[in-house]
């Protein structure tokens, strides 16, 4: 991450143990998609079918593998073994992440009992409650609400306008994007004569290291105990995680997905967009559910599911194929009946 | 609610007219789920199938009924008629709800024409507009925006970062969780030669007593008149209520559900998660719609519906069962045809 | 928009080149729905079937066309060619949009390098970052976060608590409602030995003139290049637009809809509520998708689609009709088989 741009194509090749082909003095000052690449840009060429496009990029530096190099004197290449990983590392230097503050912004309101590590920062108008603990290198951006007894690890980024309700614990290197609310009440009620009475939601939320939560999500606190999100899990925008859910490691939850209470996702589960899982559903390790799928029953490990109710994707695809043939089935059935002299029931 | 913990098992039994079995001097200082209960915890034992688990809880106090008591000298029980209700009352004392302020926080911006009752509070960085009225005992937590002419009743909790747009009225004992936006413009347009022109949304939103609205919801104001949410209705997270909707009393709307404009829910309607209702749909009293169901037509009272389009759940379940048999239907139809010497159409 | 109420029915008729029928001195001081109209209200009468209701409105002023006038001495009409457009113009004067600030509120934090045009305003507790540019007549309401290098055009309204992340560009006359987050990271990862590594999302978001974005939406920035929303497009609440999406002009996206990455909507596409589109889907000009529909394949221009997977609406309706007849198909098939002496397979 200590990459300093601009740098020449030759220096880039040396830095990443690559091979230079073409003009080593060409400068790289930015990155771009193949279709937009101009002078100063590093572009990433990944698939042979784009080789025609590449021929026009006489002013950019092309990052690719030995196999994909195009013999053309006018072009400059840096050839490496894993161009995508290296492109990502260079692109990282252009990240938009705001500082928004230096140390503790004077407009922030920080309780005197909060512990803010050296090298952590708190942005404008953020509220940091009693006994909050914030680890080194963590940046709390503007307009965040961090309730009492929240613990945040090291090197996290809490983007503007996140709510972390009291007692929530956040691991290290976690990113939580704007508008997300963590540790709000779960949705549980007791019927009484006067109507529904809220069941106190006095548990918490525990978020492990390397978790990423998108914008405008809601992760509810447990009734008792903790709602948990495991190591390395990545959550997209507008996702709802109900109270007492237990989400494993390295899961992926795409945008608009909702988990009712006490759902268990084992490790490496992948949920597409707008998936819905009912109370207490357990999804086995490595299972995948296609977008808009939904279920109220448990799903097996390492299978791919789709539909509402979700069934193995091969079955759901063949079902859908035959659903479109229902008019034909209807006609053929009627014809058989008329041949047999039956009247329809 | 004036319960003071820690208290002994004997005192707890006396307080709730229960019967003590075991060690009356054992102290209760917290509550927990049965599987986590340790020393000092009150745990709630509800079903016979957990009786094995209960045998190990030699350090906790167990709250249950006379029927479920386990004869075991090492255990301590408090036996009552409605253990769930009493557990809820004890748990309530551990609620996480933040104060976030005392009276009006000095960082809040409150218009001089706003009326804030004695015993109400306004948190850090909250904005209270002109002529706003806030009732006794109501807590506005940090980062809230309360627009001009908003009226909020007594003993409400408005969690951090709620937006109440101008003129909205909120009843008593209402809870609105973080990120929710009330009284934004409804989604209505007139086609013109230059494109779509917004129809002014100059109505309001009226929220009755005892309503609970989750995090990151959107409740739009009416075009004219009011969008209304009736007494005791409970709304989960990420729910959308369109302009001019009329929601009755004691309804339940689960997470991710969306109501288009002018939807009418009669009293005690229950909508599962991710349900979608089209413009002007009316749902009869006590009707229920299963998760991910959707409809653009009216639904009858006291029926349970599912699917898109939503049909009575018995029909939709038998339909789904037969959908999975479509491959079999297809094969059997073809076999009949071949027996009859037909070619497929 | 320089309409000054109250005004008499006669003045209103003159102003809009209409014809007065009835009491020209009757005053109009408000607008209302037909069912609520009382003294001082202008009500809009649009359909003959409401003529009975109209007979009771002896104190209101009725806006309608020559064709719909009801001969009744007690009623007062203003007759115009396009009553809906004129009603909209009058209603506009009652808009609730808050000022929330005059010029730059003293509690706002504005970087000295930001350029705020004369006649623009910044509300309480808003944060305006480095090199931000805000055009004339634009109102930034309270609690907004405007990151570094954001550019906002003229006469926009950015409602309370919007997040505009760094480098985002917003056109003229754009409205963005509360809680919306623009320019958050797209959801893209590379698998590595240690788990998923975020692909830097270093592109931006470009929003054209006359766009309207509802409350609590998320519009992610592009990986490289820009996520774009075209001229005049209207987006409802809780909508997700993934990274690199290209949305054309005059599109309509209803509440709860989600677009995965790199989706292309050509001009005038209409998406109902809770629609879901997969990565790289292209929807042709003027196509429509009914609520809760979803697809991972391209859709043709000027067609109407429904269902998951979305198919032309005529097909999906006939499929749904026959799905409900599956129990009948099953019975008839079994009867044919028994007549032919077959056993079921």
Image: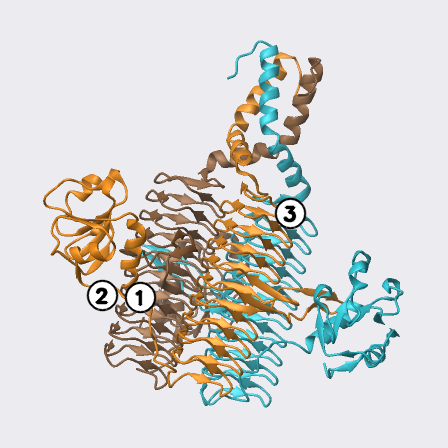
Chain colours: A cyan, B brown, C orange
Whether the residues at callouts 1 and 3 have beta carbons within 8 Å, the answer is no
Q: Quadrant of residue A158?
A: bottom right
Q: Is residue B262 left or right of residue A114?
A: left
Mark 1 or 2: in front is 2
Circle 1 SS class = loop
Query: Could you tell me how many numbered marks the image carries?
Result: 3
Image location (x, y in percent) of residue C201: 64, 69
Residue beneath disc 3: A305
Residue beneath disc 2: C4
Residue beneath disc 1: C96
Vertical side of B4 occupied by B305: above or below: above
Is the residue marked by circle 1 packed among few (<14), some (14-19), or many (20+) residues within 10 Å?
A: many
Frontmost residue, C143 versus A339: C143
Circle 3 SS class = strand
Vertical side of B271 occupied by A51: above or below: below
Vertical side of A108 occupied by A294: above or below: above
Q: Mark 1 and mark 2, same subunit?
A: yes
Spatial CA distance of label 2 from label 3 is 61 Å
Is the residue marked by circle 2 packed among few (<14), some (14-19), or many (20+) residues within 10 Å?
A: few
Spatial CA distance of label 1 from label 3 is 47 Å
Q: Chain of mark 2?
A: C
Q: Chain of mark 3?
A: A
Residue at the spot x=88%, y=63% of the render?
A67
Circle 2 SS class = loop
């Amino acid at each position: 991450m200590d990459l300093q741009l601009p740098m020449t194509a030759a220096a880039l090749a040396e830095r990443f143990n690559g091979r230079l082909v073409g003009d080593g003095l060409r400068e790289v000052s930015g990155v771009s998609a193949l279709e937009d690449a101009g002078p100063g840009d590093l572009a990433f060429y990944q698939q042979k079918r784009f080789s025609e496009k590449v021929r026009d990029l006489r002013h950019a530096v092309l990052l690719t593998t030995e196999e994909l190099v195009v013999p053309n004197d006018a072009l400059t290449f840096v050839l490496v073994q894993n161009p995508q990983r290296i492109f990502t590392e260079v692109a990282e230097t252009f990240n938009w992440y705001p500082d928004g503050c230096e140390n503790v912004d004077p407009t922030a309101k920080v309780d005197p009992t909060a512990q803010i590590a050296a090298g952590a920062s708190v942005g404008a108008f953020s509220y940091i409650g009693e006994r909050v603990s914030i680890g080194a290198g963590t940046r709390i951006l503007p307009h965040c609400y961090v309730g009492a007894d929240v613990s945040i690890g090291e090197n996290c980024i809490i983007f503007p306008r996140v709510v972390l309700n009291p007692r929530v614990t956040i691991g290290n290197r976690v990113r939580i994007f704007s508008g997300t609310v963590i540790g709000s009440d779960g949705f549980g009620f007791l019927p009484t004569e006067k109507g529904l009475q809220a069941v106190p939601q006095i548990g918490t939320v525990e978020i492990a290291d390397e978790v990423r939560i998108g914008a405008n999500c809601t992760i509810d606190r447990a009734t008792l105990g903790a709602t948990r999100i495991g190591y390395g899990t990545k959550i997209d925008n507008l996702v709802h995680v109900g109270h007492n859910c237990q989400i494993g490691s390295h899961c992926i939850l795409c945008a608009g997905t909702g988990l009712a209470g006490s759902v268990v996702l084992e490790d490496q589960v992948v949920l597409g967009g707008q998936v819905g899982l009912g109370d207490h559903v357990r999804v086995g390790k490595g299972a995948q559910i296609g977008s808009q799928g939904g279920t109220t029953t448990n799903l097996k490990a390492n299978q791919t599911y789709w539909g509402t109710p979700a069934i193995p994707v091969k079955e759901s695809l063949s079902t859908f194929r035959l659903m479109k043939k229902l008019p034909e089935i209807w006609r053929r059935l009627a014809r058989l009946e008329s041949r047999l002299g039956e009247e329809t029931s």
